[in-house]
Amino acid sequence: MKIKGKPIFRILLFCLFFQPLSGCHKEAADQNVFIDNGKIKLGFNKHTGSLSCFSDLLNSYDWLEENTNKGSPWAIEFLQPEGIETIDINSAAKFRYSKPNPATLILRWKRFAGTGNRNLEVTATITLENDKALSLWKISVNNIRSKPIKQVIFPRIEGLKDTGEEYLAVPQWMGHIMKDPRKHLSEIQGNIRKFEWLYPGLSLQCLALYNPDKCGFYASCNDSLVYNKSFSFSLNATGELDYEMHHFPSLDSLNTSYEPPYAAVIGFFKGDWITAADIYREWGSKQRWARESRLKKNLTPQWLENTALWVWNRGRSDNVLVPAAELKQRLGLPVNVFWHWWHGCSYDDGFPEYLPPREGRHSFISAITAAQEKGIRAIVYMNQRLWGTTTESWKNENAPAYAVKDPDGRINTHIYNIFTNKPTASMCLGTQFWKDKYASLSDSAVNTYKANGIYMDQACLALNCYDRNHGHPAGPGNYWFINFNRLSDQIRSEISEEKQLVLAGEGCGEAWLPSLDAFLTLDVSVERYAGLGPWETIPFFQAVYHPYAITYGNYSSLLVPPYDELWPGEYAPKKPLEMLDKAFNKQFLMEQARSFVWGMQPTIANYQDFLARERKEEVGYLLNLARVRNQALKYLLYGRFLRSPDIELPEGELDISRLSIYAGKHGESVTTFRGRFPLLYAGTWQADDMDLGIALASISDDPVKITFDFSSDFYHLPPDGNIFIIDREGRKRLTAYSAREVKVDFTLKPRDACILEITSDK
Ligand SMILES: [Zn+2]
């Protein structure tokens, strides 16, 4: 065939013909077996079962490095008396494959070397989904002969090629994103250069590695039963990037086989983390936890949904309820209280000796009752798993019998309190003893002490307990999550519906949606507790689950960290309630702006009434956000998160304070940084009626000109309609749009916020 064309075209053809042979290339067909659905192509070596082709057909990208040591798609680590014994495909003398249909491969390895492995069989089944760039990976391990397994790694995808300009998005709590993960991995000292995340802990089961302009690697899992597992990215010995999923069987000596009751999901996409969230939402929103979410089922008390602002204060009622009442007066909307250090014991080391409250029974009950008469409700802190091992009750109530045990049967303790150095242990949620204890404390806090809810610290995680007397499988499993559900049911069963109990928890997690009414997502304040690092916060959890979960909270404070009066006096700050340097005011605004545009209930930590005078602009900013948000709940409380239009976001340098969460031991509570951050924040939300709300919050000292346009089709809006602006002055029409062309052009005042509403309303 004669090829005509300009030189550049010829070069392109040359490149096509002379690209190096990859494992996906046709010439490799005699060595490999493939499955291919037109979107994704996978190939395995016919003789060994190694992964040889991993190709995104839609975006013409072969993900495996050309000269990579084509890896074993799995590994199994057995626990042996002499240490860990690891096997993979290289340990098998026999490999067979079958292709029962064009979309499915069954790979089977047998005759393993090593004592006790003779009859072992490992079977992997890989299926391509119809019409999607997704594949399902199942593994089963048979004839284990009672050898305990530490972990099964599957799939393992070795040598993921660098797409350049790469991002890694991970739903750690709310969600974090890192630019250039390979570089950051390579900077890790030591032999193991790995990021690994436990689920639960990850709030959902999906990770994304991508170049937004080129292609993306989607790693997920369809486990609706919430088994403990982990996901990792690491650099191998040759500096290539590997992805692995880690499965942890329970240590049941009778087991002869292991097969996770779910499949790993691997796929490709083009876009960014929001695209990945869209893919995951399609599965996640169909699961039991979404159907039975308390918000979706209208089980969350109305007062929680009406909360316009949380005050997160600590200590006695006059330091908590009085400032909240003042702020409620100022705001003119519902303000409720998230209350730490109300309890009789010292924070972190005296749990669970919460009762009676430190200010005494009578004082507490009369203060909370008076606050409730003013419309202020309070949720009180109670850690849902810690018990101080130096407390009297630890011994008197025989708590050690019901604490979490490690594989050697020991109780691991942890010292959270740097002032007293007194340790705590984790209680096992799998025991009825601990559920009874915690439910009884909750009963007293609500029924006797009149609290409106309980904040269950350290929720949305799952521990492994190896105590065989606790009635749960030893080691990993899904019993922690199941027992959290039972605990929340038990608490609710002892409290009448009239009390409108709210259960809130730390962090967020898809599986907790049916148990908890509200989720504390502190990642908006990541700089305040972690400084400036490679990870930035993204609203990954909200992008998937916002219509199913109320998220709230931040560390956003204008004061130095507080100090518990029950801690040793020698470390107490000389000037309690001291204000933070004004240089950090912008950081406060930034945290509040993020919460607003990411659809969270606003919160201020450590509020005192003098701040309304001394930090007038900052408090005013927060109140303005709360007022604007309150007019737009169909978006910011109930709406679906969508990708924002292309809006130019000006940036600026900000002073950042990192604080120890509580007062530092020698007064060194603040470390400072300087970083570059957006001065305008945007979040786009679609209501059930399909109206679109674009939340905008400026922290700039200058007016910000906002111009952008988009097609109404992108958001499934009618071709003609109106654009309203909702701000401190109410709702007014900005302009109309027609012929599908939505054009926005207006100026946002310095440090102001609004919702742009795009609707067919007149
Ligand atoms: Zn246990």
Image: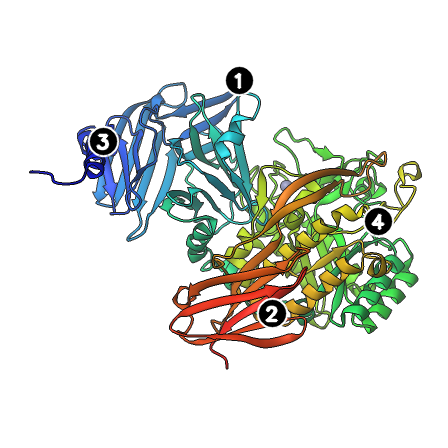
When asked about the image quadrant of residue 394, the answer is top right
Q: Report the side of 673 relative to 565 (left or right).
A: left
Q: Residues within 10 Å of mark 4 (few under 14, many from 20)?
A: some
**Nearer to the camera, 694 or 123:** 694
**Nearer to the camera, 753 or 445:** 753
Q: Position of residue 693 (x, y in %)?
A: 54, 67
Q: Residues within 10 Å of mark 2 (few under 14, many from 20)?
A: some
Which callout, 1 or 2, points at the residue further toward the start of the chain? 1
Residue under label 3, please give it: 32
Q: Nearer the viewer, mark 3 or mark 4?
A: 4
Q: Position of residue 342 (x, y in %)?
A: 84, 54
Residue 82 marker: 1
Residue 579 marker: 4
Q: Amino acid at mark 3?
A: Asn
Secondary element at tag 3? strand
Secondary element at tag 4? loop
When asked about the image quadrant of residue 467, the answer is top right
